[in-house]
Amino acid sequence: MSADAIDSSTLPAEPPMPRWQKVLAVTVAVATIAAAAFAIGRFSAFDSTPAAQVPLDSSAEAGFARDMQSHHQQAVEMAMIIYPKTQDADLRAIAYDIATAQSAQLGQMQQWLIDWNLPAYGSAPAMRWMASSSEHSGHGDPALTPEELNAQMGMATDEQLKQLAAASGTAADCQFLELMIRHHEGAIDMVDAIEELGSNANVLDLAGKMAATQTSEISAMQSLQSRFGCSG
């Protein structure tokens, strides 16, 4: 028999890819897409605000951009945790949308601060810019601890993130949904405040899009909670 006539059916089958390699490959792929979305957000964040109307360091717009960046970073982190291990296609789609859309918005908000010639971080406590809001004046109280401020923002704790990373199956899905719903609700509070206090058209436009998207995602995630039989 010639070398060209080897029966491929007699060759040993390639061993299946271990699950950890599949998870790693998926995670790297989504991380790459999210990074590309961030870059697109940066380059698309052209700010046509007249120089006389550029937000000040103490403005609601600057506070919103800074706080929402921190908020989005954690949302992307949680989405990247659940995306490769959930077995539910609807939840995977939501996680993908959160990772990519919020990465792009991160890029936009970072670019705003650069365009406004403002530092990435302010000296005031998180959400202190919301103090003048009629509905959220209690947010950002300097007397609160960093942990309490994070709770006001709907942020997950470090321990909760570790638990999410360690969980699997429906337990992981339910934990993600609980954390992300609360996270979205915190973001919507910030959107409500900036819509009341802000005047920059670019900021208000993006805030409105955030509110619409995250309100829709909350509804979708609550439906998944019911379907999965999540408790609490």
Image: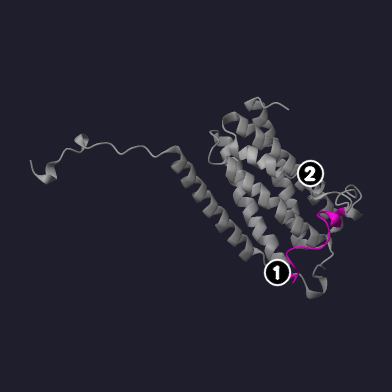
The residue that mark 2 highlights is 151
Q: Nearer the viewer, residue 43 or 185?
A: 185
User: Marks 2/1: CA distance?
Assistant: 28 Å
Residue 128's tag is none
Relative to 79, is 44 above or below?
below
Relative to 134, is 199 above or below?
below
Disc 2 element: helix
Residue 11 lies in quadrant = top left
Dot 2 or dot 1: first in sequence order is: 1
- Give the dominant element type of the magenta stretch: helix, strand or loop: loop
Which residues are the magenta region? 114-130
The residue that mark 1 highlights is 114
Disc 1 element: helix
Q: Nearer the viewer, residue 149 or 32?
A: 149
How many labels were placed on the picture?
2
Q: Amino acid at mark 1?
A: Ile
The C terminus sits in image quarter: top right
Residue drawn where x is 72% and y is 46% of the image: 212
Residue 124 drawn in magenta? yes
The N terminus sits in image quarter: top left
Q: Residues within 10 Å of mark 1 (few under 14, many from 20)?
A: few
Relative to 188, is 50 above or below?
below
Q: Amino acid at mark 2?
A: Ala
Residue drawn where x is 81% and y is 67% of the image: 55
The image's colouring method is one colour
